[in-house]
Image (cartoon, rainbow, N blue to C red):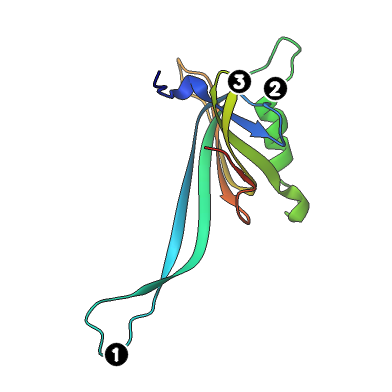
Amino acid sequence: MAKTYTGRDGSLLLNGTTQLKVSDWSLQGELELLDTTTLGQCERTYAPGIQTFTGSANLLYYKDDAGRNDASTFLRSVIKTSEVTETDKVQLTLRLSDGGVNSDITFNAFISSVSIGATVGDISRAQISFQVTGMPTTVTI
C-alpha cells in the first residue's frame, strides 16, 4: 500500500537523540555551476562547482513534567557569549518515520541564526537556521 508522509512522520534529532519538539523543518540543497563556455561556442556549458546545504526548523518552547525545557537547553548551547569555534558544531538528523523504518538525512552543521518569539494564543517558538558543513554523512531516503 502506498505511504503518504505528513508532518506527523517527521522529527529532528540532535546528536542522535530526539530532544526537541519541532513543528517543522526544511533542508535546501544548491549546486553552484561554473561557466565553462569558450569563445566561439553557441551554447553555454557548465561544470559542477561547490555544493551547499542550508535549512531551518521551528522549535516549540515548553517545559516538560520534570521542569526541563528542551528548546531552552538547546538554545543555551548555541547562543554564544564567546567566540564560536569548531566544537560548536552539532549533528542534526532530519527524519521521516514509517513505523519502524526511518528515512534519515544526517549531517554536521552550525546554527547560523536563532529567533525567539511569543504570540498571544499560540505556543512560543524558537526558529533556528543552520548551515551544513561538509557533506551529509547519512542519506537513507
Q: Residue furthest bottom?
A: 39
Q: Which residue is mark 2?
A: 69
Image quadrant assignment for residue 17? top right
> Which mark lies nearer to you, 2 or 1?
1
User: Where does residue 69 sit, x and y in percent of width and height?
Assistant: 70, 22
Crowd class of label 2 (few under 14; some 14 to 19; many from 20; radius 10 Å): some
> Which mark lies nearer to you, 1 or 3?
3
Q: Which residue is mark 1?
A: 39
Q: Which residue is mark 3?
A: 100
For residue 105, above or below residue 3: below
> Which mark lies nearer to you, 3 or 2?
3
Q: For the residue marked with disc 2, what is the amino acid?
A: Asn
Instruction: Name the quadrant of the N terminus.
Output: top left
Which residue appears at 46% of the width and 24% of the height?
7
Asked if residue 79 shows in the view, the reply is no
Image quadrant assignment for residue 41? bottom left
